[in-house]
Image: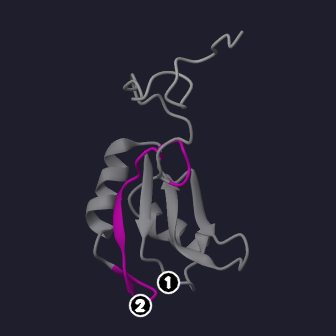
Amino acid sequence: MNIYVGNLSRLTTEETLRRTFEQFGQVTSVKIIFDRETRESRGFAFVEMPVADEALQGIAKMNDQELDGRKLRVNEAREAERGGTGSRPRFEDRGPRSPRSGGSGGNGGGGFRNRF
């Protein structure tokens, strides 16, 4: 089970998180998320525990607990939604469009007219 750990201190290390969650069972991975530009912790991490019951116990016991001077927010990680920024897709089907008034051609006429 993948666990989200938020409100981390910038001083918290992956090893500290590993030791903290190993109290509840096997930890297969720990990943603190860093800012690409500043290379500083973004204040959250993911801890992977293979046994769901152990992970749920870790979530229950560690949520709202203090670590490195910060009160943790711990819950089951949710799958990230595809699309990146959270805005709607650039090109999306908005359904049928209503016809424009004024006829075809946009100049009040009926499109191409033979003037000869």
> Where the N terminus falls, by quadrant?
top left
Is 91 or 76 nearer to us in this picture? 91
Residue at 52% over, 65% down: 45
> Where the C terminus falls, by quadrant?
top right
- CA gap between label 1 and label 2 equals 7 Å
Is the residue marked by circle 2 packed among few (<14), some (14-19), or many (20+) residues within 10 Å?
Answer: few
According to the image, label 2 marks what residue?
A: 69
Which picture quadrant has residue 33? bottom right
Report x, y in % for residue 44. Answer: 50, 69
Report x, y in % for residue 38. Answer: 71, 80
The magenta segment: 66-85
- Please say if 77 is above or below 115: below
Q: Amino acid at mark 1?
A: Ser
Which label was assigned to residue 9?
Answer: 1
Residue at 42% over, 55% down: 3
Residue at 52% over, 17% down: 110
Is the residue marked by circle 1 packed among few (<14), some (14-19), or many (20+) residues within 10 Å?
Answer: some
Is 114 or 25 nearer to us in this picture? 114
- Please say if 27 is above or below 40: above
Report the colour scheme: one colour
Report x, y in % for residue 67. Answer: 42, 82
Q: Please, what secondary structure does the residue beneath circle 1 have?
A: loop
The question of residue 72 being in magenta is answered with yes
- Please say if 111 is above or below 28: above
